[in-house]
Amino acid sequence: MCGVCGEVRFDGHLADSNAVSRMTAAMAARGPHGAGVLAQGARAFGHRRLKIIDLSEAAQQPMVDNALGLGVVFNGCIYNYTEMRTELSQAGYRFFSTGDTEVLLKAYHAWGPRFVDRLHGMFAFAIWERDSGRVVLGRDRLGIKPLYLVETPGRLRFASSLPALLAAGEVDTDIDPVALHHYMSFHAVVPAPHTILKGVRKLPPATLLVLEADGTRHQETYWSLDFTPHEDDRLRRRPDWEDAVLDALRVAVKRRLVADVPVGVLLSGGLDSSLVVGLLAEAGQSAAGLKTFSIGFETVGNERGDEFQYSDLIAAHFGTDHHRIYVDSARVLPALPDCVRAMAEPMVSHDTIGFYLLSQEVSQHVRVVQSGQGADEIFGGYHWYPPLLDSITPVDDYAHVFFDRDQAEMARVLDPRMLADDPSRRFVAEHFAAPGATRAVDKALRLDTTVMLVDDPVKRVDTMTMAWGLEARVPFLDHELVELAARVPAEQKLDDSGKGVLKRAGRRVIPHAVIDRPKGYFPVPALKYLQGAYLDLVRDVLDQPAARRRGLFQRSAIDTLLAAPEEHITPLRGSKLWQIALLEFWLQTHGIGE
């Protein structure tokens, strides 16, 4: 797990190595164990290293193979790299390191850009050819690893984080009205290729971008999620699906043990992370050596701020080396500015600060953790899926249960010059119309898995863990498990109040009390109800001269929210006031528009 960046010129000028150095420095937290910059002619590349696999200096990046005429910067982990290395060695390739980075170089040389089809893992990379000048950028199937782009005439820059590109300079930082509409509709999710800034884009998941030396390019989507049943799926009974899901999850969890350092688990006490712990124990991980970590906050009103009773139950059942981390609200407020500074994009979810503080503690014990993110999206755990099961107006029904605001409210909140003509509904309609999913609920599950999951929980976990040099691995986003889950009949996913097939499979591994509990989430009540010092912070952010000059929101709407923030909660239990304030907080923290 690392940070990558670079600049490619197409106009005959030398690449700006100083700009690449600034980007590399801006990502120091992503890779505290090493740094490198390589500049040659029209290309320059930078890297920050977090040592997980092959801890030697032989695996430093940027990595160059002079014999093959190739170089690479790479962020992520390839879980099947040893199998690929064996295959490549048998084909005559010789290796100078023992990690996964060099395997990418040999695999590209052997099989071309579509070597990505063979990869099991999470990745964002840039591979360049010395002789042709070609540069290939790639991102993993589920977008676990980010890759941001800035294009100007004759030049393209890329980086693992948006703030790194800002550090390089020369970025159009005007607000993108389409992205703003998405942000206000999808609880801060801005789907690729957009970001909130006009001048920054992100490479979509499962995408290869091939850049030729003269600036011509080819972009290709190399994977898509298909909900069409296989022929033999029609013969599967309920127990067969449970067997298949459990077997696939076992493989996914085992794959993510690949490391030359210990691997821990973020244990919320819910079904998903508990299953990860149970399967690790089943796979023979030493219980006493398996470190698990849980976090909790103080209760506000009737809203409990921790789920320790469940995480404690799992830790005791499997005998893990458990760490319970309690965060007093007095600690949350001082940490918010640094948390916002760490955000690659504005992230409105209340639990962002939770993951930030949790990662700070966990990074003192391990460098790698497995996490349960993704199960709700791929196995139908959310409340908005059942109404879509037999929907005949899926776009309307999805918008009704999922959107934070309708277009009429958007017109009351946004300044008229920033109001786009409902691009969020159009986005959903276009996504739903794509082939590969015929039922309304499958269309929603596909959208949430390939878009919302990527740019909300997955991005949140990656960004907050990497802020402390911690690598998070997500077994529920193993692409083979995701493909299998897509084919499980929707009724089997949605029964038992959601994730039915996963719950039934889980009963074979973990205590039933964790499965039969009320559905929980990662609560930070102080950011939902915005009282006292938190409300003072929000008011100060929205009253800053930069916010007033920017004028994204109508002042009457802001005043209404400030007057009674607890009365303005989104359908998905978020604060509408915090959503607006967080965007301004992020823009001001990164010096945008000042």
Image (tube, rainbow, N blue to C red):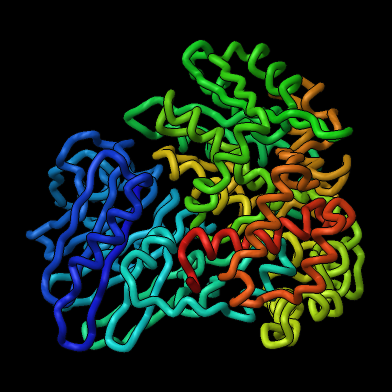
Q: In this view, does 106 lie above or below 268?
A: below
Asked whether 134 or 556 is in front, the reply is 556
Q: Is residue 366 above or below residue 191?
A: above
Asked whether residue 433 appears in the rendered view, the answer is: no
Q: Residue 435 is drawn in which quadrant?
A: bottom right
Asked whether residue 472 appears in the rendered view, the answer is: yes
x then y, percent, for residue 298? 74, 28
x then y, percent, for residue 235? 77, 50
Seen in the image, is 108 located left or right of residue 520? Answer: left
Seen as rendered, the residue at the extreme left is 67
Q: Which residue is drawn at 50% across and 73% down?
A: 593
Seen in the image, is 136 located left or right of residue 185? Answer: left
Q: Residue 268 is drawn in which quadrant?
A: top right
Quadrant of the image containing the N terminus = top left
Looking at the rendered structure, the number of numbered marks drawn on it comes to 0
Q: Which residue is drawn at 53% across and 46% down?
A: 339
Seen in the image, is 483 located left or right of residue 102? Answer: right
Asked whether 446 or 25 is in front, the reply is 25
Asked whether 551 or 156 is in front, the reply is 551
Q: Residue at x 72, y 32 (%)?
A: 270
x then y, percent, for residue 385? 83, 57
x then y, percent, for residue 51? 29, 37
